[in-house]
Image: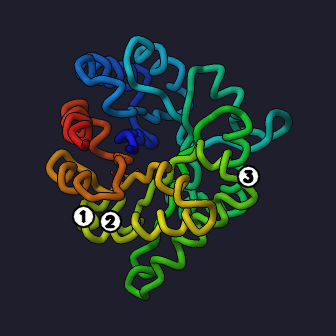
Amino acid sequence: MRKPFVAGNWKMNTDSYTSVNLAKDLASGTLEVASESITLAVCPPFVYLQAVAKALSASNIAVGAQDMYFEPKGAFTGEISTSMLKDVGCAYALCGHSERRHVIGETDELINKKVAAAIAGGILPILCVGELLAEREDSQTEDVVTRHVKCGLAELNAEKVSAVTIAYEPVWAIGTGLTATPQQAQEVHDFIRKLLAEMYDGQLAGEIRILYGGSVKPGNTAELMAQQDIDGLLVGGASLKADDFLAIIQAAAQKT
Ligand code: PEP
């Protein structure tokens, strides 16, 4: 049984005051949510990671970074290593979020190096994959997702891949208010799980958590989570409102 996993991606939002306040509201709002029933994480901007980790230290909510670099240290101006992330209490890192792929221009090769470095450095990567609207309309969804998964996990053996969470995020549904229907999401999640079974084995494929992301709200959480292969949610906009994110967490934790 895969434990539900809900992660919030705060993107380039909040400030030193609102990030800590949001974290405190989430910590108090999840006091009754058992860590056995759900895995929880939030990904604040780098500069607030340490303060947010402190505010969440007595809670079941882990902290993740929105990105990381693959080199351990040195002359890489502006970049952040896995050991720096661990040093400030970070457990997860998003790798290959669509905004980094399509706005910043990250390639599959770079994302693969980040996933590998995260695992080697003791950070749990959340590998984001998903197609653009034009790619879906051109029936390329499976090809794009196959490329993102195969390239993102290239050269990684099954033991290493067991540390990875995959987030399927159709780009046309991110921040647009358009959500994939539960059936559209389930189809792709099922496809990814079968792909993992081909690449590794059925047992590993059955254990890896595949999250859905794209305009998740309290009102669509239950029907998304009711799908067999949707193991959790990566939430952007709605994770910035404590009440909405808590409602999403409560609904996702009901999955049995
Ligand atoms: C995201 O940032 O990964 C995301 C899914 O954003 P939103 O929920 O706002 O669509």
Q: Which label is found at residue 113?
A: 3
Q: Residue at x 48, y 20 (%)?
A: 53
Mark 2 and 1 residues: CB-CB less than 8 Å, in contact? Answer: yes
Image depth: mark 3 or mark 1 in front: 1
Q: Amino acid at mark 1?
A: Pro
Q: Amino acid at mark 3?
A: Lys
Q: Residue at x 24, y 60 (%)?
A: 177
Q: Residue at x 50, y 50 (%)?
A: 208
Quadrant location, the C terminus? top left
Where residue 217 sits in the image (x, y, percent)? 22, 49
Q: Tell me the CA gap for discs 2 and 3.
A: 28 Å
Q: Secondary structure at mark 3?
A: helix
Where residue 83 sits in the image (x, y, percent)? 71, 27
Q: Tell me the CA gap for discs 3 and 1.
A: 32 Å
User: What residue would you read off at disc 2?
Assistant: 186
Within 10 Å of disc 3 (Cα), the crowding (few <14, some 14-19, many 20+) is some
User: What residue would you read off at disc 1?
Assistant: 182
Mark 2 and 3 residues: CB-CB less than 8 Å, in contact? Answer: no
Image depth: mark 2 or mark 3 in front: 2
Where residue 218 sits in the image (x, y, percent)? 18, 45
In the image, 77 versus 233, the foreground residue is 233
Q: Is residue 75 above or below residue 227?
A: above
Within 10 Å of disc 1 (Cα), the crowding (few <14, some 14-19, many 20+) is some
Can the viewer see residue 6? no
Q: Amino acid at mark 2?
A: Gln
Mark 3 and 1 residues: CB-CB less than 8 Å, in contact? Answer: no
Mark 3: is the Cβ under 8 angstroms from ligand 1?
A: no
Mark 1: is the Cβ under 8 angstroms from ligand 1?
A: no
Q: Secondary structure at mark 2?
A: helix
Q: Residue at x 44, y 14 (%)?
A: 57
Q: Is residue 187 above or below residue 74?
A: below
Within 10 Å of disc 2 (Cα), the crowding (few <14, some 14-19, many 20+) is many
